[in-house]
Amino acid sequence: MKQVDIAVVGLGAVGSAALYFLSKSGFSVLGLDRFDPPHAMGSSHGETRITRLAVGEGEEYVNFAQRSQEIWKQMEQDSGNQLFIPCGGILLDSGVQPWSKHGGE
Ligand SMILES: Cc1cc2nc3c(=O)[nH]c(=O)nc-3n(C[C@H](O)[C@H](O)[C@H](O)COP(=O)(O)OP(=O)(O)OC[C@H]3O[C@@H](n4cnc5c(N)ncnc54)[C@H](O)[C@@H]3O)c2cc1C
């Protein structure tokens, strides 16, 4: 039986990223998923995702978002594919129910 250092169970965006960076760190890794990624049975499915540096959930997340964009660029270089398409965006709010943005309503 082949032995590995680390097994990651669940290969959505989070598990795949963990597996990728663990393997780059020199660990022998095994990724397990109940389906056959990429598939449509998790939150990471679909063709597009939005990411932004204006992180309304809290400014403590901004460094993570900036770092993730560096990683996207690196993955584009490694794969030779455009993965990240920068574009503008508009957030529309009904104004009926206030929601928190950077700690303010
Ligand atoms: C409709 C929708 C739109 C979204 N839009 C955005 C967006 O625009 N921008 C953004 O940043 N985020 C967005 N999110 C959130 C983001 O997609 C999720 O936070 C992220 O994909 C979660 O990744 P995950 O790896 O934690 O989970 P998942 O992607 O759900 O991965 C979990 C994996 O675990 C596997 N698994 C589950 N149970 C087992 C088991 N028992 N054994 C083995 N494997 C198992 C599943 O098959 C799956 O592959 C959106 C989410 C949804 C639902």
Image (cartoon, rainbow, N blue to C red):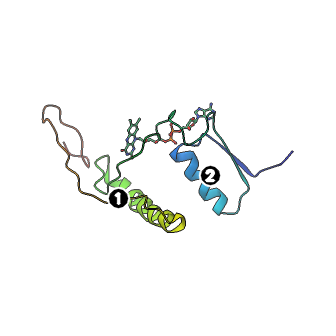
The tag earlier along the polypeptide, 2 or 1, is 2
Q: Looking at the picture, how far across and down is residue 100, in whole percent? A: 24, 41
Q: Looking at the picture, how far across and down is residue 20, in whole percent? A: 60, 56
Mark 2 → mark 1, Cα distance in angstroms: 24 Å
List the residue tagged with mark 1. Answer: 85
Q: Amino acid at mark 1?
A: Ile
Q: Quadrant of the N terminus?
A: top right
Vertical relation: 15 (above or below) 41 = below
Q: Looking at the picture, how far across and down is residue 76, in whole percent? A: 47, 64
Vertical relation: 58 (above or below) 46 = below
Q: How many marks?
A: 2
Q: Secondary structure at mark 1?
A: loop
User: Residue at the right extreme?
Assistant: 1
Taking the spot 38% from the left edge, 47% from the top edge, the residue there is 49
Depth check: 59 or 88 in front?
88
The answer to which image quadrant residue 59 occupies is bottom left
Taking the spot 53% from the left edge, 46% from the top edge, the residue there is 14
The answer to which image quadrant residue 92 occupies is top left
Q: In the image, is 74 to the left or to the right of 32?
A: left
Depth check: 25 or 32 in front?
32
List the residue tagged with mark 2. Answer: 19
Give the number of the disc on residue 52. Answer: none
Vertical relation: 20 (above or below) 39 = below
Taking the spot 82% from the left edge, 49% from the top edge, the residue there is 3
User: Residue at the front extreme?
Assistant: 81
Label 2 crowd bin: few (<14), some (14–19), many (20+), radius 10 Å: many
Q: Looking at the picture, how far across and down is residue 84, in whole percent? A: 39, 59
Q: Are marks 2 and 1 in contact (CB under 8 Å)?
A: no
Q: In the image, is 51 to the left or to the right of 29?
A: left
- Give the number of the mark in front: 2 or 1: 1
